[in-house]
Amino acid sequence: MENKDKKALDAEVTKALMGENGEAVIWILKNWKKLLGVILAVLAVILIVTGITSYKEAQIAKGNEAFGMAGSEKEIRAALAKFSGHSAADSARIRLAKMLVEEKKYADALKELAAVESSAAKLMSGYIYELNKQNKEAVAAFNAVLNNVQADSAARAEARYAAARLHIQSKDLAAAKATLKMTLPQSSGAQHWEASSKQLLLQLENGDFK
């Protein structure tokens, strides 16, 4: 009788300690090893992700320093070789291209710019082609910017004027007029090129380039 009373008392005490979540507590007690394994696995993933993030941040900082200190052609190339995927790589390639143009290494400059997707790089390529007397390629480069609806309106306006100017040089006045009549989105940055294009179109219509 006493054993039954003791068991009943133990059951009541256990129930009181566990409260309404008794079944959950019992499950945890039975499966604590599995639960611990899951917790450790989650912690391992967190540590790995944290480690990768820290590594990436360190690489970004190193890249910033490398590109920031790179002043010569050799230093820029070294930084590009080590941090080619860095956010500052494109601007570094443009800086390198400018150095190469000063040395009249047009082909090398164009090669660097070909790796950059920005409108600035495409415009610069057009001007380099023009410097190298490759007007057909220059017009193609300018048209690539002009016809890119995702490009900045100022860049497109500059490209329109540059392409039209080259059409005039090659005596293709119809192409020049058609280019200048293209309508582009307005922006404050495009005002200079808009005005230049209007002036050039006026000269065309007045017969100044016959």
Image (spheres, rainbow, N blue to C red):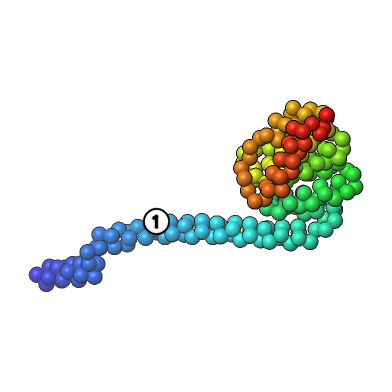
Q: Which residue in the rendered view is the most extreme toward the left?
A: 1
| Amino acid type for the residue under numbered disc 1 | Lys
Q: Is residue 32 above or below residue 12?
A: above
Q: Quadrant of the N terminus?
A: bottom left
Residue 107 in percent (x, y) is at: 85, 39
Look at 71% across and 33% down and name the residue there. Answer: 179
Q: Residue at x 74, y 52 (%)?
A: 91
Using the rendered image of the protein, determine whether residue 103 is visible from the camera's viewpoint: yes
Drawn side of residue 99 relative to residue 45, left or right: right
Q: Which residue is mark 1?
A: 34
Q: Quadrant of the C terminus?
A: top right
Q: Is residue 159 visible?
A: no
Viewer-proximal residue among 195 and 50: 195
User: Is residue 159 depicted above or below 177 in this figure?
Assistant: below
Q: Residue at x 49, y 60 (%)?
A: 43
Is 7 in front, or is 94? 94
